[in-house]
Amino acid sequence: MNKQFKYFDVMNKGKVNFDQFSRAIEKIGVVMNEFDLKLVFNKYDLSGDGELDFKEFGMIFSQNEGGDLADNSGSRNNDPYIQEKNRQNLANAELRHDSP
């Protein structure tokens, strides 16, 4: 995880601000609109200082037993982005008459 954090922490400050986070996410090929990306960033910015330290950053990419992104409470699927994606996938499956 340290290597990944250094990729995001381009200023080597031990913290990653939203702009650094956004640019690195884009470079690794994750496609998210700015609103959703801010939701994710703010969810894991536990200190509320507008930057992610190593611990906060690590929580984004750690996975719980179910394979979902971990959240602060340890419960699954509380992330609004994941909930919306799941809702969209179910709606698309219904339109295609697929089983979810």
Image (cartoon, grey):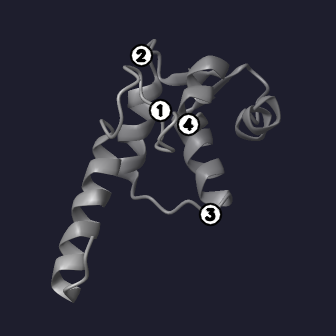
Q: Amino acid at mark 4?
A: Gln
Contact flag, marks 4 and 1 (Cβ < 8 Å): yes
The mark nearer the N terminus, 3 or 4, is 3
Between 7 and 99, which is closer to the camera in this rendering?
A: 99
Residue lying at the far right of the rendered structure: 3
Mark 1 Cα-neighbour bin, 10 Å: few <14, some 14–19, many ≥20: many
Between 22 and 88, which is closer to the camera in this rendering?
A: 88
Asked if residue 35 is positioned above or below residue 3 in the image, the reply reads below
Is residue 35 toward the left or the right of residue 56 in the image? left
> Where residue 48 is drawn, which disc sits there?
2
Question: Picture quarter containing residue 91?
Answer: bottom left
The mark nearer the N terminus, 4 or 1, is 4
The residue where tag 4 is placed is 63
> Disc 1 versus disc 2: distance between alpha carbons?
19 Å
Give the residue drawn at x 60%, y 51%. 25
> Disc 1 versus disc 3: distance between alpha carbons?
21 Å
Residue lying at the far top of the rendered structure: 47
Mark 2 Cα-neighbour bin, 10 Å: few <14, some 14–19, many ≥20: few
